Image (cartoon, rainbow, N blue to C red):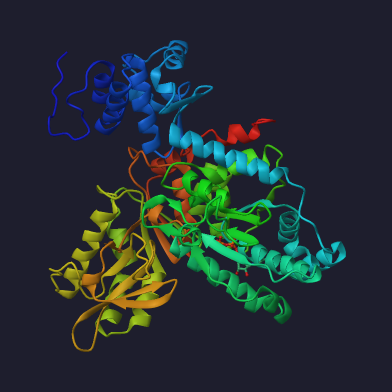
Amino acid sequence: MTTTVDEFDSTLALTATGILRDFNMAGVILAADVHVASRLTALLAESNESVALACALVARAVRAGSICLDLAEVRDEVGEDGEELAWPALDEWLAALAVSPLLADPRPLHLEDTRLYFDRYWREEEQVEQDLRRRAGRTAPEIADERALLAGLDRLFPGTAYVEQRNAAETAARQWTTVLTGGPGTGKTTTVAGLLAVLAEQAEIAGDRRPWIALTAPTGKAAGRLEEAVRREMTQRLDAKDTERLGDFHARTLHMLLGGRPDSSTRFRHDRDNRLPHDIIVVDETSMVSLTMMARLLEAVRPEARLILVGDPDQLASIEAGAVLADLVDGLVGGGHIEAAELRTSHRFGSEIGDLALAVREDRPEDVLAVLRSGGDRVRFIEDDDPREALRSALLPDVLAIRQAAEAGDTDAALEALDRHRLLCAHREGPWGVNYWNRTVERWITEETEDPLWDTWYVGRPVLVTANDYALGIYNGDVGVTIRLPNGSLRVFINSSRGRLDFAPSRLGNIETLHAMTIHKAQGSQAAEVTVLMPGEESRLLTRELFYTAVTRAQDRVRVVGTEAALRLALSRRALRATGLQQRLSQATGQ
Ligand SMILES: Nc1ncnc2c1ncn2[C@@H]1O[C@H](COP(=O)(O)OP(=O)(O)OP(=O)(O)O)[C@@H](O)[C@H]1O
């Protein structure tokens, strides 16, 4: 058999030989993975091909968000693409690794059972495990006045409607580390606000100063939402005394809380030698926190500070390596180190979106389809493999409303129209991708308005900020609109957690057009109405977590566009990430 090699295909490593070449040609590993393996094996004079292959496969695993490679499972996980390849037998593979210079000091790789790690992730995982075990092993925090605690919980979470939240708050009040989990609208923020009030009351009773509280989240957008939601709870539900006890606060990104350093993207001003001064640290959207950030946070939290990790473990995990929240639920709670604080009842959605989300979480595909097809107001399923017409009629009214308001210089109306609707795509490129749909919407605008939109910056261009810019005060996930000022010039107005800011277009670097957005980027944000464009069945991104994350971005209405086959496929596939944190935490003694 002869194979034609496309020498311009950047995924192919033209210099690869032997087993690396075979795996590369089959599309299992990319050129970048081959380079990592070749460099490491050359540096440490390792000639065993199966070790080189293991190296390349670890690089591949990390690219896909795993912390490590499970050698016992990789063959199944690769599936069809690897069927014809000469995989090493597991025992021989492990034996070759055991004597490899790559696993001797200074070891770039670590082997733990059948899990193979790059050193950095192995160390981070171990640090996270040990810090969590240490925190869980401390004597429980003292309650200044038991009766006042119970009375406070009853006051802040009254009646049967709040029982779940009351119990979660009580659990959290009695431990140093809490993982507070729940789907969207299950009252996580309400629980946090009530818990903070109870803890502040306890501090007052004990004669301590007002607790120093940090509210934080992995993205600026999520931090902004957290602050807004806690403020809302304070004004709507807490009485004046509780509010006064809590004092004023601002939510910040984890980067800002830990204190970014110009010389490093993975090290911060606050660390084990310079701990955070706070007494209570609340982290929202913990599903988006990577292993590296969790490691940095845990080393910076004082042992006698409470840590409350809030999130939804069914959502997509961080785009960086790790699936920390799910591991904490399975390992820290499942391993019996701490008590669970889980919220299950949705209070926000009309029941249809709540029912849909629950059916996805609980893996009931027939019910998912039944809710989607029930013909209700809030959930619609447009079963079409050519979504153009459906999307045009769904999107155009809001797109034109943004444009009209932007032309008239009405920033409020333009930003309000922008928040009404999001088109979410799984991919960036290709026919189901954000780039294609951004261009398509722009073409529709041209057809409707006869404006050719020659320039990148046009009136009504909605934008998404894609990187934190501390100098400008805008953060990854912030959104804005390009407005025409009375003098004819264009100015971009962005809703940031620092308030509404405006800029000349030329000052903005990390920006994308926002007629469509990837589901990954939409994590941590919501819109009144969401249209989810399902990719074709061949999409590798199609997973249950992706679909769940997409539909739960909607506050009032969700429209799913795609085929039943694609939907069923998504529901049947989990976004698997190999990590060892859960296993480590589940072991009785992990020291
Ligand atoms: N026990 C309850 N009974 C009725 N309504 C509630 C209850 N708890 C919370 N709510 C209301 O439900 C909505 C969602 O609550 P909250 O914002 O606390 O949920 P959440 O889990 O933080 O949501 P998300 O993560 O999706 O932002 C809010 O409007 C809140 O006031």
Residue 41 position in % (x across, y down): 31, 22
At a point 71% along the width and 39% down the height, the residue shown is 336
- Say if 347 sits above or below 428 in the image: below
At a point 27% along the width and 76% down the height, the residue shown is 403
Camera-side residue of 85 and 565: 85
In the displayed orientation, state which residue is furthest to the right: 147
Specify whether 241 is left or right of 287.
right
In the displayed orientation, state which residue is furthest to the front: 273
- Say if 590 sits above or below 124 in the image: above
In the displayed orientation, state which residue is furthest to the bottom: 486
Quadrant field for ligand 1: bottom right
Q: Quadrant of residue 156?
A: bottom right
Q: Work out whether residue 577 can be spotted.
A: no
Specify whether 379 is left or right of 488.
right
At a point 30% along the width and 30% down the height, the residue shown is 36
Quadrant position of the C terminus in the picture: top right
Residue 272 position in % (x across, y down): 56, 50
Q: Quadrant of residue 482?
A: bottom left
Quadrant position of the N terminus in the picture: top left
Residue 381 position in % (x across, y down): 43, 54
- Say if 451 sits above or below 321 in the image: below
Q: How many marks?
A: 0
Residue 586 position in % (x across, y down): 65, 33
Camera-side residue of 151 and 428: 151
Camera-side residue of 392 and 198: 198
At a point 22% along the width and 18% down the height, the residue shown is 17
Q: Work out whether residue 279 can be spotted.
A: yes
Q: Quadrant of residue 119?
A: top left
